[in-house]
Image: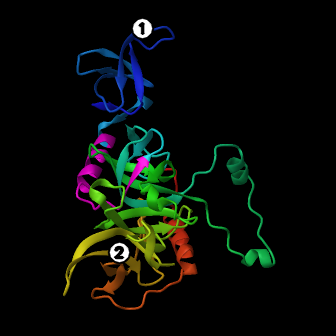
Amino acid sequence: MVYVSARQMFLHDRVAAISNIVTEVTNGQPLEVVEHGRRFLKVKTQKNEIGWIEDHAVIDGKVYDGFTQLAQQHKDSPVAATATLRNDLYMHIEPGKETEHFYLIPGNTRVQLLERASIKKPESAGFAPLARLAEPEKPASGAAASEPPPPPPMEDWWLARDPQGRTGWLYGNQLDVDVPDEIGEYAEGMRYIGAYVLTKVDDPDANTPDHQVPEYVTVLAPDKSGLPFDFDQVRVFTWSKNHHRYETAFRLHPIQGYLPVKLFTAQTPRGPVPAFSFELSSGPDVVTDPATGVTRPASPRTIDYEMIDTAVKRIGPDMAPIPIVHDKNLEEKKDKAQAKHGKSGHR
């Protein structure tokens, strides 16, 4: 069996400059292989229509099984955020534009984001890379020799799950994280990584269903790919009943934060109250998965907060100080780890 990976293709009655169209097949459709040609396959549809198709327009059973296993492995994975596709986008078996792809997800589809990976951006097609390979590099001298090379340009990918449960890697540059318009304007040059409803408050004058207004915990990061952390700011927005607008009740930055953000209920003398948690790095060491480019802290810490009215308070077993700085060596450590494993966009 093979499966159509192209958006749509025609089956032809023969491999020739002039041929007749047998039928049209579409993305995801299974086909039975009847005969192997040089660059074409003779296939049969479920309606017993037989024709020839180019082999680059399909994936084989091994790749199909890989997507099936990916969906099975992550069927219960927590959702880090939700996002909407800007355009039609292929799901890949691994991060990288050159990796095997299969499902074509339509633009405007809302997907669940599970985890983020960063890989080296592939070099643009052209003659420059070949020219550099052909000429041996000359040894540097003086002060230039001691300067480290600049880090390679990176791109972000997200492991995502669509409404049908299909799971694969999507190019992060074509995803818009779902953020309510009411708080989206407060990004202040950062990008939202996630926005989560912490609780709802009643405001009789609010123009919302049942006059219930959501309050949010959000996480943000610089608008840059390849960061060795998922976010560097936590911000809680509460609703002012006097001014009928959102206000910042809590802000923590800059930190080295990691998804997912978890919501739960904390028990207090006043009763249950909304709470949330996230992970921090307890040191500069990070672990980068050589197969995907997913970066996690080597020694994670779980930080918990509760919110009573509009006051956000630290709780939980870990009450040690939170480093309110970026570790400048953290990105260098990740770059070295990726270079050691040779992780790139080409596979």
Which amino acid lies under the numbered mark 2 shown in the image of this protein?
Phe
Q: Position of residue 175 (x, y in %)?
A: 46, 50
Q: Nearer the viewer, residue 286 or 254?
A: 254
CA neighbours of label 1 inside 10 A, class few (<14), some (14 to 19), many (20+): few
Seen at 68% across and 69% down, the residue is: 149
Over which residues does the magenta segment extend?
A: 63-84
13 in magenta:
no
Q: Is residue 16 above or below residue 273?
A: above
Residue 339 falls in which quadrant of the image? Answer: bottom right
69 in magenta:
yes
Q: Is residue 142 above or below residue 48?
A: below
Q: Which color scheme did the rendering employ for the protein?
A: rainbow
Q: Which residue is mark 2?
A: 278
CA neighbours of label 2 inside 10 A, class few (<14), some (14 to 19), many (20+): some
Q: Secondary structure at mark 1?
A: loop
Q: Secondary structure at mark 2?
A: strand
Q: Which residue is mark 1?
A: 20
Q: Position of residue 82 (x, y in %)?
A: 37, 55
Seen at 24% across and 72% down, the residue is: 264
